[in-house]
Amino acid sequence: MMTFSSVIDPLRAANRFSRLPLFSWKIVSLTGQPIKLSCGIEIAVDSELKPGTRGDLMILVAGFRHQHHAPARTLPLLRQVARQHKSIFGIEAGTWVLARAEIIRAHKVTTHWEDLENLSFSYPGLHVVGQRYVIDQNIWTSGGASPALDMLLHYLRTTQNRSLAMDVASAFIYKDISAPTDAQMIVSPGRIQQVEPRLAQALEIMQESLEEPIPIAEIAAQLGISTRSLELISNKHLGVSPGAYYLRLRLQAARRLVLDTNSTMLDISVRTGFNNQAGFTRAFKKRYGQSPLNLRNSTI
């Protein structure tokens, strides 16, 4: 819902502040039926996507289970409609759909950080980067809700003017300070970055080494503090030990792979830093109350 709003509301606000009908849009679905978001709210659509649809900008927003919501039979239509637009925006998993529809082939792109590795593996011809948003020719891609807002503000700066983009950002009380090349953060440190930068640095080290976990003592050494100091800092600001938080990050990554990919449990256990599948299954079940295989089967 936030991702969807991040691409519609900046255009609405631009119309408001300019007092001109700069932008008009239609919301379409592949079936003509309302779009049910992951939160359960349904969004009314103007129409079904039709072959003659054309315009300046096609914005493709997608999230979880994009294969289900954009089945293979719909991809030729998407490809045809894309050719009838000047620019194409792929928002979050929208990049996946663009790749599946062969609208992008050898472009530099991004997607949500959860899917960066899988997108790169599935489409080796793409240059997949972990940036907030990427512009390559007429293809614009972003990593999620906040990066999508960044990207739309940049679109306003380049197609309209900087002052209008500033007005729109101010309407949302939003600090438009992120560069497109800034990395997507698996952990948003927020105020921790200000009040305890050593912990923020530790979290960054953790998120960059999920596949090959680094001992907590080694992380502390990189920060120039003792293991005990890192434990005290983590318990104070996160409420858990650094080891427990590290494990949580790895299991969160594993849960996404279980639900959103067809990877084997052995492959998932390796990619999230577990020495063996049995240990992975025990840790996963303790965290989520069921085995990873049962979780996958229950959502099919």
Image (cartoon, helix red, strand yellow):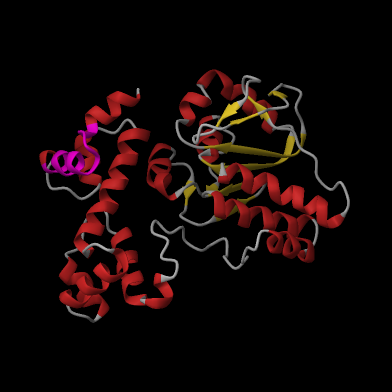
Residue at point 30% right, 64% down?
238
Say which quadrant the C terminus sits in: top left
Q: Place residue 79 in its image quadrant.
A: top right
Q: Is residue 109 left or right of residue 265?
A: right
Q: Is residue 139 visible?
A: no
Residue 47 in picture, x, y percent from top left: 72, 23
Count of labels shown?
0
User: Magenta stretch containing residue 23, yes or no?
Assistant: no
Q: Nearer the viewer, residue 7 or 17?
A: 17
Main SS, magenta residues: helix
Say which quadrant the N terminus sits in: top right
Residue at point 39% right, 77% down?
195
Residue 16 in picture, x, y percent from top left: 82, 52
66 relative to 227, above or below:
above
User: Magenta stretch containing residue 286, yes or no?
Assistant: yes
108 relative to 41, above or below:
below
Task: Give the extent of the magenta segment.
Answer: 279-292
